[in-house]
Image (tube, rainbow, N blue to C red):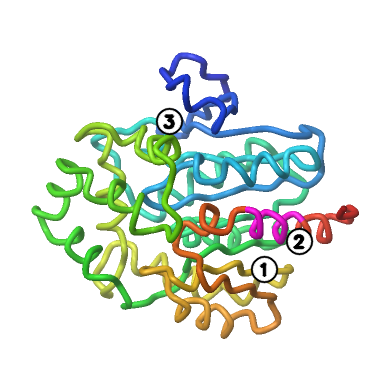
Amino acid sequence: MVTVNNSFSFPEDLREEYPFKQNNYTTKQGFNLNYIDVGHKDSLNVIVMVHGNPTWSFYYRNLVKSLENNFRVIVPDHIGCGLSDKPQNFNYTLENHINHLEQLIESIRPNNVHLVVHDWGGAIGMGYATRHADKVRSIVFLNTAAFRNHEIPSSISICKLPWIGEKIVRTFNAFAWPATFMAVEKKLSPLVKKGYLFPYNNYNNRIATARFVKDIPLTKDHPSYDKLLDIESKLRTLTCPKLFLWGAKDFCFTTNFLNKWKEFYPEAKSVIYQEGGHYILEDEKDNVIKEANRFFMENSNLQYH
């Protein structure tokens, strides 16, 4: 069931930055998943943008604005994130996030899916893509991964510690708040910073930012390890065009991750922004938007101007 949600309380000063009408998809588990749905509803080419942690659909706002005149653009907030429900008794696993993304996309019934993935949205988005390789026509990767890797910053390792890690993240917002200055090389404006932090304003609302960190599988006995391994094993089945737009100063998804991606997709184009950080859509907004628009137009049989 899909309904338009007009009941949330959204700060007026953020509406210029994030002017999109919100929609709700009710998952099979009964949760309300919020998503942006703009552009040409009859378009055969649907671009789906998948965010990571601790962002939400707000991260893609400028890219959405640049694409909505030529495409239908769908941007969900994962359960626990953004303006979606934040259940306290939900199992925040990679498998469940992939299932919700799959349910939403299937409810739209697109002919062609084009993906944009960032951060842990890479694992979620590629989880969908490896299930539906016949539908995915192109992919843009922004500082992300969808394979096993033990390279993890100490600041994130602390947040994974049993008991105390989640307490720190949820009590002090010690993931979303530090990201507003650690994930960028160019200082965010107070308004944009407010946008990133708005959905994570209390202990209960920060549950997903904590559980996403816990769900990073570093060992074989981790509940999400086999799912990530399954995705990794199927990456080469995706033969569609791919574009990597990468911030070289990312403290988390370093260029080592990009080099690993190149092992899977040696033919893919990559653009490295030497002064860009993890939130590459903030640090290199205009350049990333230009590259992504050209890529999607070329791979949708549309002319780029």
Which of the pair 130/123 is nearer the observer? 123
In the displayed structure image, the side of residue 87 where residue 188 appears, left or right = right
Amino acid, disc 1: Leu
The answer to which of marks 1 and 2 sits earlier in the sequence is: 1
Look at 30% across and 72% down and name the residue there: 152
Which numbered tag is attached to residue 243? 1
* Badge 3: residue crowd in 10 Å (few <14, some 14–19, many ≥20): many
Which of the pair 304/50 is nearer the observer? 304
The answer to which of marks 2 and 3 sits earlier in the sequence is: 3
Look at 55% across and 62% down and name the residue there: 142
Real-space Cα separation, disc 2 to disc 3, in angstroms:
29 Å
Amino acid, disc 2: Phe
Look at 30% across and 33% down and name the residue there: 87
Give the residue number, with chain letter if any, for mark 3.
83
Which segment is the magenta one? Answer: 286-293
243 to 90, vertically: above or below:
below
Residue 218 percent across, percent down from the top left: 28, 72
